[in-house]
Image (cartoon, grey):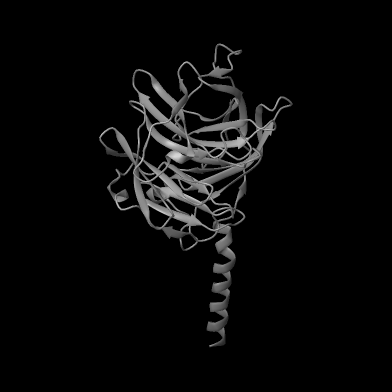
Amino acid sequence: MVRIFLGAVVCLGILVVGLPALLAADVIAIQAAPVSLHPNELDRLSVGRLIYRGGLALSAPDSRFGGLSDLSVAPDGRRFLAISDRGHWVEGDLIYDTERRLAGLANGRLGPLGDFHGRQLKGLAGDAEGLAVYPDGSLLVAYERRHRLWLYPPSDPPFARAPRVVPLPRRAPAMSENGGMEALLRLSGGRLIALSEDLMDGRHHVGWIGDGIAWEELRYRAAVDFKPTGMTQIPADTRHAGDVLVLERRFTILDGPGARITLHRRSAWRPGGTLEGEELAVIRQPLTVDNFEGIAAARGSRGETLIYLLSDDNFSFWQRTLLLMFELPK
């Protein structure tokens, strides 16, 4: 009986000790090669209303790195956190040169997204697409394939504690398997906004605004052939403080990948509203562009708005993980 009891204690100890290891973070060396806005016109520094402030092609000697589908950047621009569509997250410090251009990454960490039982998400269950950050450090993730919203409590490393379910809007289950809530945002003040990539009402993408319990619908109009894949709110102490940026993506056989960034007044996000923002830029070939899915904003040292774009390489040899930074002039 004593042996049985001791064996149970040992097994329990293995489980308790082993659980954090399953969700532990690993140090990862992320290589960051500088890229220009135009491969053949190195002095080109603008597109639309945006000024190019540096960019990086990211890679790592780790098969888990890639497929990055959304990101958050600290308000001061010093650190980033991204999620992947294969059940992982990656974070690191952002490095700038003396001219405050994006120049590199340091102190990279990578780890798994977990489920309710402390196990790593695998396969289709780990297709994380949207990320929203709460003031206390909680992290809301929108998953597709198996559509759901999970809210992870604050932890270090992130996503190490069991999440809780945030109810989906009523029509969300009608989203296509690969066309879920890629654009997700928590507004300052607490409201949540989500836009569906593929669920449409005519020419408008169906979206929702709510408190995480009750949701009401709104509509978003993207440009022709574009779909919303990311959202961010401009931080305080900038000219456009509180306004919302939406990232749209497209891919066509003739033109390849493209990205469009639009600006929306915060007051426009209301139940029943129809959103059609002010176009800031369209990025297409021959400019440096890929499958951009993530967007974040931070405040620069002069009070300017900095915009970060992140691409999903789909773990493909033909694509890249790009992190580009732009300035929205005052």
In the picture shown, does residue 238 fall above or below 169?
above
Q: Quadrant of residue 308?
A: top right
Depth order, front residue of 109/148: 148
Give the tally of numbered discs: 0
Residue furthest toward the bottom? 1
**x then y, percent, for residue 315:** 46, 35
Vertical position of residue 149 compared to residue 257: above or below: below
Camera-nearest residue between 80 and 235: 235
* Residue in front for this viewpoint, 11 or 96: 96
Quarter that holds the C terminus = top right
Q: Residue at x 58, y 14 (%)?
A: 44
Q: Residue at x 40, y 35 (%)?
A: 228
Residue 84 visible in this rendered orientation of the protein:
yes
In the rendering, at what x and y percent does residue 244 appear? 49, 37
248 horizontally vs 10: left or right? left
Q: x and y percent of residue 71 in the render?
A: 53, 40
* View extreme (left): residue: 202
Left or right of 131 in this view: 300: right
- 133 w.r.t. 40: above or below: below
Say if residue 318 shows up in the picture. no
